[in-house]
Image (tube, rainbow, N blue to C red):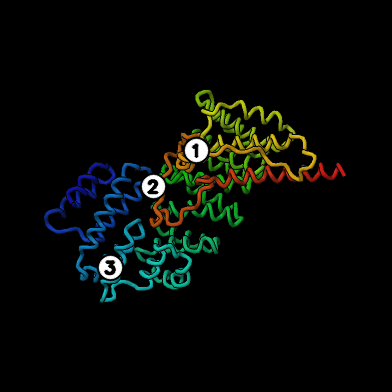
Amino acid sequence: MLKRLCTILAASALAAPLALGIARANGTEELTPYKMIRSLQYVQDSVVLGDHSAIEMQRFMLGAIDERLRAADPSAFRDPRNVDAALVYVMSGGNPATLDLLADRDIEGNFDSRVTDALRQYLNGKGPLIVENLTKAAPEYKNSRIGPYLFLILGNAMSQQDPIEAMKHYDWARLTAPGTIIEEAALRRSVSLAARAGLPEKGFRYALNYARRYLTSPYASQFADVFVELAVAHFDEAADGRVSEILSFMDSARQREVYLRVARRAAIAGNQALARLASRRAEELAGDDSSRSQVLASFYEGLAAVPSADVFSAAEALEAIPDEKLSPRDRALREAAKAVADAVVRPPLGESPAQAPAPIAERPAGEQSELAAEESGSGMSPFGQPVEESPRRTSGMTAEADAAAPGDPAFDGFLASGRSKIDEIDALLKGEGQ
């Protein structure tokens, strides 16, 4: 097992010192858990700093550490470093059953039952239940090795009920673990919570810090989604300057992707001015070598014009876009826009109290898996392939729901908004006919 771990570590230049240490330990004595955890932390931090080749190594190391912890003699946990190692392991994507095993074996009281009980509940999906107990216990670990992890988890657990307090816990976690996977996760989630809490200035500060450090993280695509959410929800002249400042840390391809996502979200939200602005900026960044990006920018601009007085031109422009230029989700969105446009311009029926919209083409069942990975519809995100966070990993324990999840709530919201406009028109026409 250790020989294989050494081989994998040696494959990465970043991990050469770790491979040397393991090689020395191999054949003489097994590495203690806390030494193996140091290697895991190094690898995980390398991943979010851009070494994506270490992702497979991370998975293997989690398995190797799991075996080591399960085989360890209970006396090994008289060393507090090994106790911390076991807790860090399970908070870093490890097997929750291993924590159950170690806690049940602990007859000497080496593990703090308040912490292990909280983690066991949390990893079983009962996060809100741990807030009170962990709020009391976590301050005792502020300056310990597990402190940043506990505060990240506490922030996750209370993010739904109290986003402002959760951000304070994220702040502590990231400030005590700079340059790590902890800081990456805390910054990314803080952007989302600031948007939800109506604190755009805090959100833009978090986003700026993230853009400076972690644009090469495999989770950067999720950051782009929450940043777009923040920008669309709080866009004004001042926010435009903040957005430009943050985008200045990105290359033109990433900037274009962000503007496409802003255009799509704004068009669905009915913010025509922002949708047009973002679409035009995306077109400017596309240049001559990215015809698909230009098509998408025009598509989102046309989408924004559907509820306007220029509905006829908008419908014609949408109809003219070839299917192969759009993702499956954007094709479905176009069908919704066409249905809304048709219903708006259709003459009212004499006896009908409300007009039924034209039927929307159903999505093929096989497309559901594609929808979740295509927020902009471009299918070529420069942020890389989105990495699905483990539901129990510190970097993804409560990953925010993507607005592009299967079922696309954004699509449903656009359709509902269009039907609402149709109902308003019907009511006006009915009033004029009386």
Dot placed on the residue nearer the N-terminal end, 2 or 1: 2
> Would residue 276 be visible to someone looking at this image?
no
Q: Which residue shows up at 74% across the image and 34% down it?
A: 346
**Disc 3 designates what residue?**
102
Query: Which of label 2 and label 1 is nearer to you?
Result: 1
User: Above or below — where is 264 with respect to 287?
Assistant: below
The three-letter amino acid code for the residue at tag 3 is Leu
Please name whichever residue, 320 or 39, is drawn nearer the observer in this view of the structure.
320
Q: Which residue shows up at 27% across the image and 68% down it?
A: 102
The picture places residue 80, in percent across and down from the top left corner, at: 28, 68
The picture places residue 360, in percent across and down from the top left corner, at: 60, 38
**Disc 2 designates what residue?**
48
Checking the image for residue 412, the label placed there is none
Q: Which residue shows up at 68% across the image and 44% down it?
A: 419
User: Above or below — where is 396 with respect to 331?
Assistant: below
The three-letter amino acid code for the residue at tag 1 is Pro
The three-letter amino acid code for the residue at tag 2 is Val
Quadrant where the C terminus lies? top right
